[in-house]
Amino acid sequence: GQLLDIMDECIGDVGESQAPDYRLLQVIADYLLSYPDEVHHPKEDLIFLKLQGRDSDAASKLSQLLDEHRELREITQEFAATLGDSTGAAASRPDQVMQATKKLVAYYRHHIEMEEEHFFPTAERVLTKGDWADIDFAFSERTDPLLYEAETKYKNLRAKISRISK
């Protein structure tokens, strides 16, 4: 949520003659493509598969989760392409970047809301301690780089999140 707030802030501060902070948005795009898309969402997909094995009726009501993960990856890839390369040079006009940012933020907020209201409460109710242990074991090697101090690539982004958390 804080990352989405930062993205909103990046485009909210932009006037007609200004451009968003492309470099910050590019770091965010890199993070979204490398952690949520490669670790977090696959972990949720495994939770879903476990849930499906325990309660197929509950899982069928949450089947859009897997589709949303695919859609989020596509929207994130579009967002990254709109931003351009890491030199700070944008591939698109500021209004296109703002539109892509708004689209990604809106979809992520919708997705998080669905998970918090429906998916996680159902998973917590249905899955066993053994299920959770299997899930944790499957993903124990990758930590969130925003929480890992040695990951210097996200140092400035961590600092910005820390400032808005206070």
Image (cartoon, grey):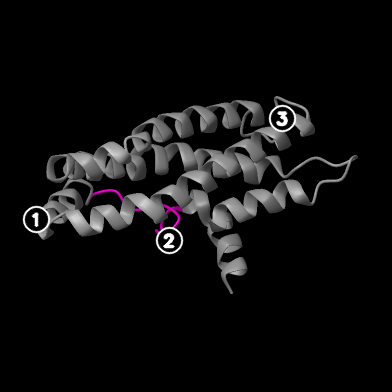
Residue 159 lies in what quarter of the image?
bottom right
Cα distance between the residues tagged 3 and 1 = 47 Å
Q: Residue furthest left?
A: 130
Residue at mark 1: 130
Left or right of 8 on screen, residue 47: left
Residue 124 lies in what quarter of the image?
bottom left
- Nearer the observer, 131 or 88: 131
Residue 56 lies in what quarter of the image?
top left
Residue 46 shows in this picture:
no
Give the structural element (helix, strand or loop) at label 2.
loop
Closest to the camera, between mark 2 and mark 3, is 3
Identity of the residue drawn at 23% across and 49% down: 141
Q: Position of residue 1 (x, y in %)?
A: 53, 56
- Nearer the observer, 69 or 113: 113
Q: Considering only vertical position in the picture, is 2 above or below 15?
A: below
Cα distance between the residues tagged 2 and 1 = 31 Å
Residue 22 shows in this picture:
yes
Closest to the camera, between mark 2 and mark 1, is 1
Q: Considering only vertical position in the picture, is 123 above or below 27?
A: below
Left or right of 51 on screen, residue 26: right
Which mark is drawn over residue 149?
2
User: Does 144 appear in magenta?
Assistant: yes
Looking at the rendering, the stretch of residues picked out in magenta corresponds to: 141-151
Residue at mark 3: 90
Looking at the image, is mark 3 or mark 1 earlier in the sequence? Answer: 3
Going by the numbered disc 3, the residue's amino acid type is: Ala
Going by the numbered disc 1, the residue's amino acid type is: Gly
Give the structural element (helix, strand or loop) at label 1.
helix
Identity of the residue drawn at 78% across and 32% down: 95
Q: Position of residue 65 (x, y in %)?
A: 36, 38
**Overall secondary structure of the magenta section:** loop
User: Does 63 appear in magenta?
Assistant: no
